[in-house]
Amino acid sequence: MTKFINPGLMKTSRRNVLRGSVLAGAAALTGAKGMAAPRSPKLYAANTQSANLYKASADQSRGSAAKPADLSGYTRVKQEMVAPPFAPIHEQVATGGPKIIEITMDTTERLMVVDEDTGASIWALTYNGSVPGPLIVCHEGDMIELTLRNPADSQMEHNIDFHASTGALGGGGLTHVYPGEECVLRWKATKPGCFTYHCAPGGAMIPYHVCHGMNGAVMVLPRDGLKDRDGNALYYDSIAYIGEQDYYLPMDENGDYISYATAGEDYADSLDAMRTLTPTHSVFNGAVGALTGAHALKARVGETVLMIHNQANRDSRPHLIGGHGNYVWETSFSDTPNTGMETWFVRGGSAVAAMYTFEQPGVYAYVNHNLIEAALLGATAHFVVEGAWDNALMEQIVAPRAFQT
Ligand SMILES: [Cu+2]
């Protein structure tokens, strides 16, 4: 089977993608400063246009006579990454001057069950082993200093494009790490808001990596915290970090999901499935049921939750059934938040924040309100909320009963 990733540019098939020598010289195009070690990912695919784009973007940084950044006045801190749906320890209102926030992420390739009922699984490409990758939180004016490590047993090269950053393809041109390599990238958070980040190694590998889970979100808070339209401070008690992931899992002729032995082995089949633009799954936090049942999100009446929703590839429309988006920032935190929303919009390739204070106990479903995706493809989470019921807000006056005809 031979398929074209980009017609006229490069052929790909299982044979030449795996341990491909198709672009043996391309590794040098994305090399880090002074890197002399041999660089040999086990699976590599890009195209000439894409490789040239990365080279041009990286050259701007490497070849320039630009002044070193002035780091005076910055304080260095470490931020420990935690797995979703949790957020790292952070301040809502910044204290002190700007910070250089050191973080570390590993590009881990791991076999993940997507749906236990069907046995659907995927060799997920991840940051730190989770889908989505960890939430990063900083304030406007801070710098993120990321150490990106690609374990030696990886099959592929990885990098990272931060939508919150400025230059070099969002850092994608400066962070290509092959198996066994690490790099360090520092960028300044100049725009407040929630932003997606994702892997973008070039060509068809970009959607392939993104649709295998390699994406996450950064929240850049205003230094003085979140505000309503009148400038009053808004605070949250907790964060629910939800990454929506569309998967395109290859099936065999019987309609069964195909199992693969290693990361990347599904490459050609995945491209075929992705070209349909019809996901087999659209799930929250990596798998069907990752945020329901025993894994449901917990809250209590009176608790204010900031729901951060990341979708790196595809539009979505979150809705909290039985609740609202009291304040919703679909765009920048500099913009006035929308209020009292029933459903909000996540542009594919972005992250949004919605704040809600629970007023009733019970189970709330948080869904993609394309309800086909919610019910059939997996895009459902649950909040289990404890507290006292308020009959002033809702009361069942008559329970279902037969009526007189
Ligand atoms: Cu990647």
Image: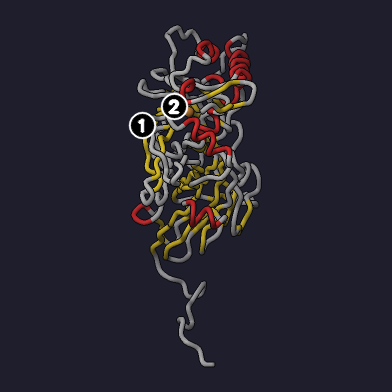
Q: Which residue is at the front of the view, 7 or 347?
A: 7
Identify the image quadrant of the C terminus: bottom right
Q: Amino acid at mark 1?
A: Ala
Tag in front: 1 or 2: 1
Q: Which quarter of the figure has residue 3?
A: top right
23, above or below 86, in the image: above
> Where is residue 105 shown, x and y percent of the image?
42, 28
Residue drawn where x is 41% and y is 39% of the image: 258
Other-residue count near label 2 (Cα within 10 Å), few / some / many at <14 / 14–19 / ≥20: some
Residue under numbered circle 2:
102
The total number of labels drawn is 2
Mark 1 residue crowding within 10 angstroms, few (<14) / some (14–19) / many (20+) = few
Q: Quadrant of residue 272?
A: top right
Front residue of 121 and 3: 3
Identify the residue at the far left of this view: 294
Q: In x, y percent, where is residue 86?
A: 41, 44
The residue at the point 47 percent across, 78 percent down is 396
Residue 105 visible in the displayed image: no
- Which colour assignment does the render follow? secondary structure
Residue type (three-letter) at the residue carrying disc 2: Glu
Which residue sits at x=48%, y=30%?
Answer: 267
Residue 199 screen position, x and y as percent: 51, 29
Whole-angstrom CA distance, mark 1 to mark 2, is 35 Å
How far across and down, in percent of the image, does residue 222 sit?
57, 39
Disc 1 and disc 2 in contact, CB within 8 angstroms:
no
Query: Which dot marks residue 120?
Result: none
Identify the secondary structure beneath mark 2.
Answer: strand
Q: Nearer the viewer, residue 111 or 224?
A: 111
User: Is residue 18 visible in this depiction of the protein?
Assistant: yes
Question: Does the residue tagged 2 have its C-beta within 8 Å of any atom of ligand 1?
Answer: no
Residue topped by disc 1:
261
